Amino acid sequence: MKKLLYVLGILVIMISCKGEQQVTTTSDANGAIDSLFTEFYSFKKSINPIEATKAGYQKYNDTVANYISDDYQLHLKDRYTYFLDALSQYDSLSLSSENWMSLKVMEWDCSIKLEGLMNPITTIASPIYDLPSFELMPLFQIQSLHLYMAQLGAGSSVQPFKTEKDYSNWLKRLEDYLVFLDTCITKMEESVEQDVVLPKVLTLKMLPQVRSFIDVPLEDNLFYTPVLNIPETISDARQEAIVKAYDSFISDKLVPKYKELHSFLRHTYLPACRETDGIGDLPNGADTYNYLIRLHTTTKLTAEEIHDLGLKEVARIRGEMEKVKAEIGFKGDLKSFFEFIRANEDLKPFKKPEEVIANFNAIKERIYIRLDSVFTTKPKAGFEVRRTEAFREASASAEYVPGSKDGVRPGTFYVPIPNVAEFNTLQNEALFLHEAVPGHHYQLSLQQENTNLPEFLHPESMGVFVEGWALYAESLGKELGLYEDPYQYFGMLSMEMHRAIRLVVDTGIHAKGWTREEAIAYSLNNEAESKEGVISEIERYMATPGQALSYKIGQLKIQELRVKSQKELGAKFDIRLFHDQVLNSGSLPLVLLEKKINTWINNMK
């Protein structure tokens, strides 16, 4: 008996020691992966300095990454390979569930970016919302660095202009930008030789953009704006030095470079541009589009499957629109109703831009009354509704720019009001839900404030999640006390239709041989957007293949998971807890989001 007790005692000690050893090993693994996450985020900030500035990090405020250069791409290939090798040393048993989820996000990011770099039409994450750019087609008419730099240079965006060092940093950043433009010209010369060029219609849109920085007096040049608003905290002598430095740089370097770029685009590049519209018409274009689908949707859906899904969604939403049209009492067909809405003066009540902003702030107050019934976790960050800057207002869409991580700069919901008399209120409630609360501001602020996440998961990233959530947020309007006016509900349907149409026209243009004109006609037949707005959107899809797919694909997945959770959990389902699960791990590839929600459902059972 004593011998048996002795043996059992030894076994207990061995098991106990083994358990302690496993805890130590797990602790060491979690500590090591945290260090790797930190290293990865440092790398991410260094390769995309403008995104670092956007997040409130000051270290890279004087730098622009020349992301289309050969050296930059070699560096990315080396580092992504390094990080993937490092991640392969871990398994799910050695890490906490939170760290394992973050590891899988990092693994997905490194893998998909490395795959893009290996593509013959090299796709690189640009400084514009981490969207892909093409090595041989680095500039286009929308979401392009030459436009983003102008926005930063206007002095009212994320680039700080508060101290003398801030002013110095911006000139250094512009020096890097000039190097980038030189590389653009070189790469576009190569693109002409390889027949990897933009559609002619897009290049024609770029020419006046570039020209706008040439044909203006110095004081009216957008890049001169910070000089007109130098803080009084800077001494008079230093203000004078800043003015002199900016005068010299803009006149002697920036404007001449824009003249060179404009001449190249007009006389060399434009004549070589193609008459076709989709990326499928380029060498290796079909494979590149398939890659971009995987990048933007984080799924294995094919272009054909997405196209068919879009057609079904368009048909479903048209059915809902018909119901609202009948409720309002309009007797004509749906296309006539679109025309009626565009021209309806009752939907254009504003006389001053300030009234538009006040209307959005009133929507905010209504939402906050019911927010606790739908969410438990709320962001601390503030936000403001602001009119879009005049220089880009005419062609801009409403957008949200996240605040700085330290909370000094609030999140900003930008609203373009180029003509207040024509500002249509139809989509105001849905637009606020999408861009502000509980859409982009809500989700991105929670993500940025989540101390349980590694820092590399704090910035925006992962468009299919970010945009999918924002589109899903539009559907929460009735739960939050909105859409009592049938016109506002129709506005929500119109915005959802807009995203459903994207599934059809983006795949149509890039995979099925649709022309620009066919895509425009399809859109006009199915939504209430103006012809000018539709043309701008179609040309956006031509320039950024696959990106427009992310909104609807992400929304449909979140809705699918909500329905599944409600069905399987029954009385145990709590919409607030479901939203917590969707939002508390940062932006996830859809395959990881689905696994997470499935695990949550099983645990709740």
Image (spheres, helix red, strand yellow):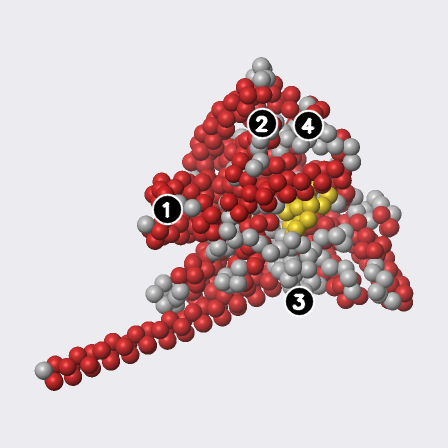
Residue 519 image position (x, y, % from top left): 57, 29
Above or below: residue 425 compared with residue 227: above
Crowd tier of the residue under label 2, counting other residues whose Cα lies within 10 Å: few below 14, some 14–19, many 20 or above: some
Say the numbered circle drawn on residue 572.
Answer: 1
Residue 153 image position (x, y, % from top left): 75, 53
Q: Are marks 2 and 3 in contact (CB under 8 Å)?
A: no
Residue picked out by circle 3: 59
Count of marks placed on residues? 4
Q: Using the rendered image of the protein, determine whether residue 523 is visible from the camera's viewpoint.
A: no
| Mark in the foreground, 4 or 1 | 1
The front one of 154 and 482 is: 482
| Mark in the foreground, 2 or 3 | 2
Query: Residue at (47%, 56%) from the top-left corner?
Result: 585
Residue picked out by circle 4: 347
Query: Residue at (35%, 51%) from the top-left corner?
Result: 604
The earlier-in-sequence mark between 2 and 1 is 2
Crowd tier of the residue under label 3, counting other residues whose Cα lies within 10 Å: few below 14, some 14–19, many 20 or above: few
Residue 193 image position (x, y, % from top left): 61, 46
| Mark in the foreground, 3 or 1 | 1
